[in-house]
Image: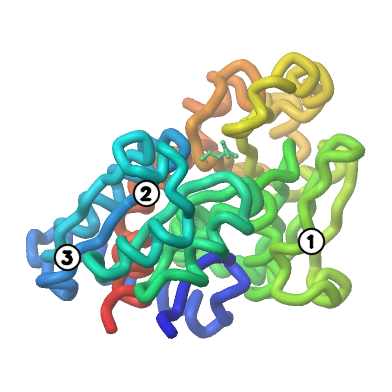
Amino acid sequence: MPRHFLSISDLSKKELESLFKRAAKLKAEKKSGRMRPSLRGKSIGLVFEKLSTRTRVSFEVAINDLGANSLYLNPNDLQLGRGETISDTSRILSSYLDGVILRTYEQERLEEFARSAGVPVINALTDLEHPTQIVSDLFTIKEMGLDPKNMKFAYIGDGNNVANSFMGAAAILGFRLSIATPNGYEPDLRALPAKESLGKADIEILNDPAKAAAGADVLYTDVWVSMGQEKDAAKRKKIFKPYQINGGLLSHAKKGAMVMHCLPAHRGEEITNEVADGPNSIIFEQAENKLHAGKAILEMFMKG
Ligand code: CP
Ligand code: NVA
């Protein structure tokens, strides 16, 4: 059975730490033009049922840099788009490919694909989780020489896929995370390594954004309307208004606190231009690091 990366909870603390180290090495190699084709001869497919700029392009470049072949497979160009089942698609693709990177809706759909797959499957975002994003974001913190264990992170906004994987990572690595969401939009505990780990971890789930931001080293946010939720956009934009990361909310955090966003940003909604482009923002560093962390993930899961 191949090993899949479907949830942040599929990784141990040790494995996360080794991904951060490897990403740093791969980043240095890329910058100095000394890349090694560690996945030479492999073919890796990307099946994306939702749009993507960063995840798709960074994984495609990562695959090419590692000497493998990438195939972008738009579901509308596959028989999947005409009703072929996800499990048949998975079996067939596994007989040609050495790995699949899948972005889709329900986590169950990803799990169904993985169950029928004879090759490793990586979660490139589902409604429940975005684990590769969080690996890359925590690498961004680690490469600055910082230790998340000595920091307070605040996630402000929707308890969505990104928040869920962030919470899972906090439980695995043991860092302090305050999450502030409107009532009814809290994160989903299924992303935790085990239900009881919430109690053991230093995670608090609140409704007050200022309280979550108080004394934080990092403020993190994401869109209020995730892909697939477009019909609730008007309602969500109203409910989430007090959760905007702006100068006022930033003033509750530590002086010099960093602001993170997985992007794409809806500027003027969850984050102001002033903050997104201001001195506290590290959003573009995060985006770049998806390439380097993505390579470390590919090596961990697709090398065998
Ligand atoms: N952050 C992220 O996953 O962006 P994309 O949707 O552009 O891949
Ligand atoms: N929560 C967002 C993340 C996009 C990268 C979404 O699912 O659309």
Residue 114: image location, x then y, percent = 48, 67
Query: Which residue does the numbered mark 2 point to in the structure image?
Result: 47
Give the quarter of the image for residue 259.
top right
Is label 2 in contact with label 3 (beta carbons under 8 Å)? no
- Earlier sequence position, callout 2 versus callout 3: 2
The CA distance from mark 1 to mark 3 is 35 Å
Residue 225: image location, x then y, percent = 65, 28
Query: Which residue is rendered at x = 8% and y = 66% of the image?
Result: 34
Residue 117: image location, x then y, percent = 41, 70
Mark 3 residue type: Leu
The CA distance from mark 1 to mark 2 is 27 Å
- Label 1 Cα crowd, 10 Å radius (few <14 / some 14-19 / many 20+): some
The numbered mark at residue 71 is none
Please state which of residues 217 and 11 is positioned toward the viewer in this rendering.
Answer: 11
Query: Which residue does the numbered mark 1 point to in the structure image?
Result: 189
- Residue 24 visible in the displayed image: no
